[in-house]
Image (spheres, helix red, strand yellow):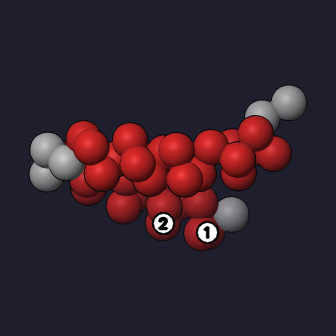
């Protein structure tokens, strides 16, 4: 799951830079993926 780690780092960088709106947008884009990962 190296890609997942990379994605998480990118999301964390967005938060660190104060880009909450972009973070939320990315999270929504990834929500379908998360549904696959979560039971």
Taking depth in this image into account, of 39 and 29 the one nearest to the observer is: 29
**Residue at disc 2, secondary structure:** helix
Task: Tell me if mark 1 has few (under 14), some (14-19) or many (20+) residues whose alpha carbon lies within 10 angstroms of its own.
Answer: few
The circle on residue 6 is 2
Residue visible at 48% across and 66% down?
A: 6
Left or right for 27, reference 20 = right
Work out whether residue 35 or residue 37 is closer to the camera in this orientation and state it: 35
The answer to whether residue 24 is above or below residue 26 is above
- Which residue is depicted at the point 61% across and 68% down? 2
Count of numbered marks: 2
Residue 30 x/y as whole percent? 59, 51
**Which of the pair 27/12 is nearer the observer?**
27
Contact between labelled residues 1 and 2, with CB atoms less than 8 Å apart: yes
Report which residue position mark 1 lands on.
Answer: 2
Question: Residue 20: horizontal and vertical position, in percent?
Answer: 24, 41
Q: Gap in Å between the C-alphas at discs 2 and 1?
A: 6 Å
């Amino acid at each position: 799951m190296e890609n997942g780690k990379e994605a998480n780092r990118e999301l964390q960088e967005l938060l660190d830079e104060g880009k909450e709106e972009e973070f939320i947008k990315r999270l929504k884009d990834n929500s379908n993926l998360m549904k696959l990962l979560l039971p």
